[in-house]
Amino acid sequence: MSRRKTFPLLAVLVIITAVNLFAPMPAGASDSNEVIRKMVGTWPDWLPRAEQCPADIMPANAGAPAFSIEGCTAAVEQCLGRCRAGNAGDCYSAALVVQRTIKTGPLSDALFLRACKLGAASGCTNVAASMEDSGDYACPNRTYELACDRDDPWACTMMGFHLIKGIGVEKNNDRARRVLAKSCRFGDLDEACSNAKAFLKEIGD
């Protein structure tokens, strides 16, 4: 979430979860930093780069991942090992640790994409948001729509924003209201929810 930008400037970059990536680093952070920097220099053969559209690999049963950024930071090699073995939550946690360590980039996107493929809908949303840098919104919008269908609040907020502004899709305030109504799954204090409410107020909820 180090790339989270304030709506509506939305060159968007992400989002997801109530994790504060600017909080003090937990114990073990220095060791995790070293592991991650080495990983960037010797890209693991089990981790493809994030080149696929998340919408094309998102499982039908994708949902909210169980993750722990503190736990992954304290034992990042084990966390990455579980990610390699197929644990979506650990891939998602590792991506967040990478964002804290070296900021958003190919490695965090690749880990988010693996989390997406393994069933973490918010991992799909993060990769889609990163792809907006290219100026092509077809894949991001497809991904947001699918992830919103799987109840990922930020995906619904992103899709609603695009529908209101006509970003890669025809403006449609009625449809925006429907998807933004799903943005408060994790309560009013969640940023996905607060942004969604601001958008609804903008168009008259």
Image: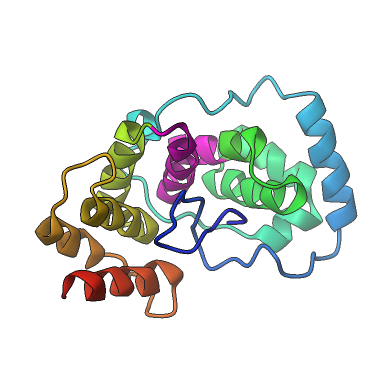
| Residue 83, image quadrant | top right
Residue 125 picture location, percent across and down: 42, 46
**33 and 164: which is toward the camera:** 164
**144 and 26: which is toward the camera:** 144
The answer to whether residue 145 is seen in the rendering is: yes
Q: Look at the picture and state if 198 lies above or below 135.
A: below
Q: Give the residue displayed 78% in from the left and 42% down from the top.
A: 77
Residue 173 picture location, percent across and down: 14, 59
| Residue 71, image quadrant | bottom right
The answer to whether residue 60 is seen in the rendering is: no
Q: Is residue 203 left or right of residue 157?
A: left
- Dominant secondary structure, magenta: helix
Q: Please check the rendered image and state whether residue 129 is part of the magenta-colored stretch, yes or no.
A: yes
Tally of numbered tags: 0
Residue 186 picture location, percent across and down: 39, 72
Q: Is residue 204 left or right of residue 105?
A: left
Identify the image quadrant of the N terminus.
bottom right
Residue extending furthest bottom? 188
Q: Give the residue displayed 48% in from the left and 46% down from the top.
A: 126
**196 and 184: which is toward the camera:** 196
Q: Is residue 18 left or right of residue 27?
A: left
* Highlighted range, magenta: 112-135
Identify the image quadrant of the C terminus.
bottom left
Q: Give the residue displayed 80% in from the left and 66% down from the top.
A: 26
| Residue 59, image quadrant | top left
Q: Give the residue displayed 26% in from the left and 53% down from the top.
A: 165
Q: Look at the picture and state if 54 lies above or below 155.
A: above
What colouring does the structure picture have?
A: rainbow
Residue 91 picture location, percent across and down: 60, 43
